[in-house]
Image (tube, rainbow, N blue to C red):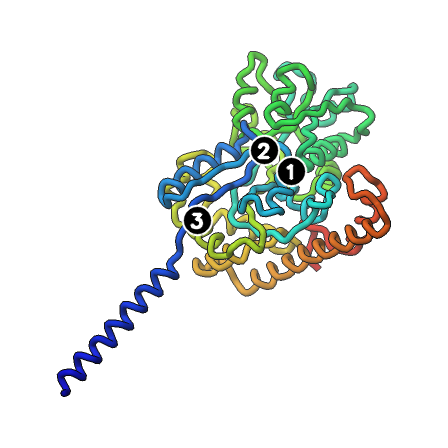
Amino acid sequence: MKRFKKIGFAFIMLFFIIEFSISTSLLAWEWPKELTIGTTGLGTGTYAQTLAWGSVLEEKTGMKVRVRPTDNYAERQRAHKAGQFPIDCRTVTDFIEIIEGGELYALRDGGPYEIGIVWVQLGVPFGYIALGDSEIKTVYDLKKKKWRISLFTPSPSSVLHVKGLLAWAGVDEKDVILVPTTSWSANTKSVVEGRADIAFTSPTSTVTYEVEANPKGIRWINFPEEDKGGIERYLNKARGPIFMRNTIGVKSSIGIYMFNNVQYYHAKQSTDSELIYNLAKWLGENYEAYKGKHKSNEEMSIDNFRGFLDRVRSMYYIPVHVGTVRYLKEKGKWSREDDAWNKKNMELNKKYVEAYNAAIAAADEKKIEIAPKNEAWLSLWKDYKKGLPLLCTKMQ
């Protein structure tokens, strides 16, 4: 009898072990069949960089990784907000425009939404180029005559940076000729193709290497480091970047004093936190496997990511996604103080969303058209967000 009891007990234990194993396997994380990442357009460093590490992710996980490039920033923002793809990437200046509902994003299906940083992409250097034989050498040379400046209109942050350039120089928009372009490649090439005298671009963009190779070469406009008033005027137009000596990108840009704008991969806060946690974990633990696939990938280490967050801990900032926070905590890279800081940022992000939704409801009631060029709508929206703290300003 005892023997049968022992056998019965053994079968029961075996049943529970098998049941537990099956339950555990069902709960095990599985990558989705496909992951789409939105990026800037063809010819940009962001597109090339994302393709580089994305190919390693695809190889190691078996998941299909698609990179979706577009030069229309507002269209990409609306698509991401609508959930058409889970991961996007932006500079800090562009994040500010999105969360604060800047003019070019102020559409019914645009505007602020609750987002979270997934991982650092890199600190992106940006500056302004002219032909190598141009008489434009410093920012003050903009006062010499009515120069033609390329304006990459689909990018709100690019437009703001051109305004920053003019503000530093003390030049009014009416005293220059703005030449609209619709792609990043066309914007950068405008100088060598003779359509513009100055173009805003990045020394790390693929197209910039092509442009630098023209017979006359290119020259980067110098911003005197000692002109603190000029820096302040610039950052009043385009918040977020840090001015510094450049160390990466095309040869002609090395050592030039220009600004560096951090760029992050991000997701909606409502995006599956397990997906974001596992993506952050993969990026952190597979750094050695993908860092050599593209020069900019070297900036995607967990220590570099943490370093960028440390620099802005005293500011209102873009919230970090809860999935990424979970991974950073596991690695000892996140503190209680970080929790408090991130909570304030998430609350501010949510307040902008609530204010935007209320403004849309009020506009509909008053039959005001919700359009970026409609002054009545922009004025109404400005009233609704009045009093909310601005991103990249000191936290109160």
The image shows residue 173, relative to residue 82, as above or below, that is above
Does residue 357 appear left or right of residue 216 in this picture? right
Question: Which residue is at the front of the view, 137 or 90?
Answer: 90
Q: Label 2, label 3: how many angstroms apart (C-alpha)?
A: 23 Å
Determine whether the residue tagged by mark 3 lies in a helix, strand or loop. loop
Please state which amino acid type lies under the numbered disc 1. Glu
Where residue 51 sits: x, y (%)?
46, 35
Q: Can residue 347 be seen in this view?
A: yes
The image shows residue 41, relative to residue 27, as above or below, that is above
Which tag, 1 or 2, sits closer to the chain's start? 2
Evaluate if marks 1 and 2 touch, with contact meaning CB atoms under 8 Å apart: yes
Q: Label 3, label 1: how many angstroms apart (C-alpha)?
A: 25 Å
**Which residue shows up at 56% across the image and 20% down it?**
211
Q: Is residue 228 visible?
A: no
Question: Which residue is at the front of the view, 103 or 289?
Answer: 103
Q: Quadrant of residue 92?
A: top right
Q: In which quarter of the image is residue 347?
A: bottom right
Question: Which residue is at the front of the view, 184 or 27?
Answer: 27
- On the image, numbered disc 3 is attached to which residue? 32
Q: Residue 75 carries which label?
A: 1
Q: Which mark is residue 277?
A: none
**Which residue shows up at 56% across the image and 51% down it?**
309
Which tag, 2 or 3, sits closer to the chain's start? 3
Does residue 386 appear left or right of residue 303 in this picture? right
Please state which amino acid type lies under the numbered disc 3. Pro
Q: Label 1, label 2: how many angstroms apart (C-alpha)?
A: 8 Å
Q: Which mark is residue 70?
A: 2
